[in-house]
Amino acid sequence: MKQLPSLFEIGLYFATLSLMAIGGANAVIPDMHRHLVDVSQWMTSAEFVSLVALAQAAPGPNVLIVSLLGWKLAGLSGALIATAAMCVPSSLLTYFFARFWQRFQHAHWRTAVQAGLGPLTIGLIIASGYVLTRGADHNWAGYAITAVTVVLLLKTRMHPLWLLAAAGLAGYFGFV
């Protein structure tokens, strides 16, 4: 692993990412992985995936992943800087853009843009799942558990924590 980043580097990266996070922090997980693991080598893929899993299991907003990544990189200061950098720019942009957007409430192009953002967000979240699967699964059993989990989530109303617990037990007993 390379030398850990400065607080300025953490803030600059997450502030930039904040402005691209259409659909929230989960939509940019692939870029977080690319930058933090592959490009900067500030953590391993296994560490990244573990932090994402912890953030998803914890109650609260999805942006918790940013706090955990900041914590891993630079402790409490890193967590605070990363979280503020991820939340403040996009919140300000949203506030000012919403005022502008209201003026075009009945415009046809506005409806088209809004209809296009839904599939874009879904695609970004699917890409996040793909990156996390590549980082967490290293054998056929892991891929099988991931596939079964996806199918069960799509076809049933089963709570995801039950599936997480089952996967954890499979790992504990050596199936993965």
Image (cartoon, grey):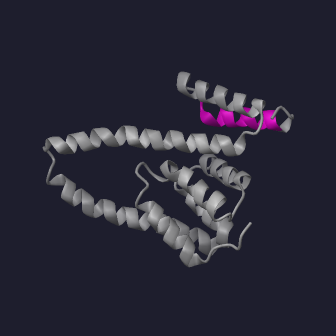
Name the magenta segment's main secondary structure: helix
150 left or right of 1 in image? left
Residue depicted at 80% across the width and 35% down the height: 176
Closest to the observer, 39 or 120: 39
Residue 16 among magenta residues: no
Residue depicted at 56% across the width and 60% down the height: 66
Single out the residue that lies furthest toward the front.
39
Rendered location of residue 12, percent (x, y): 49, 72
Depicted 154 relative to depicted 93: above or below: above
State the extent of the magenta-drawn residues as a range: 159-171
22 left or right of 159 in image? left
Depicted 175 relative to depicted 23: above or below: above
Rendered location of residue 163, percent (x, y): 67, 32
Residue depicted at 38% across the width and 37% down the height: 119
Residue 142 occupies quadrant: top right
Rendered location of residue 19, percent (x, y): 40, 61
Residue 97 occupies quadrant: bottom left
Residue 115 occupies quadrant: top left
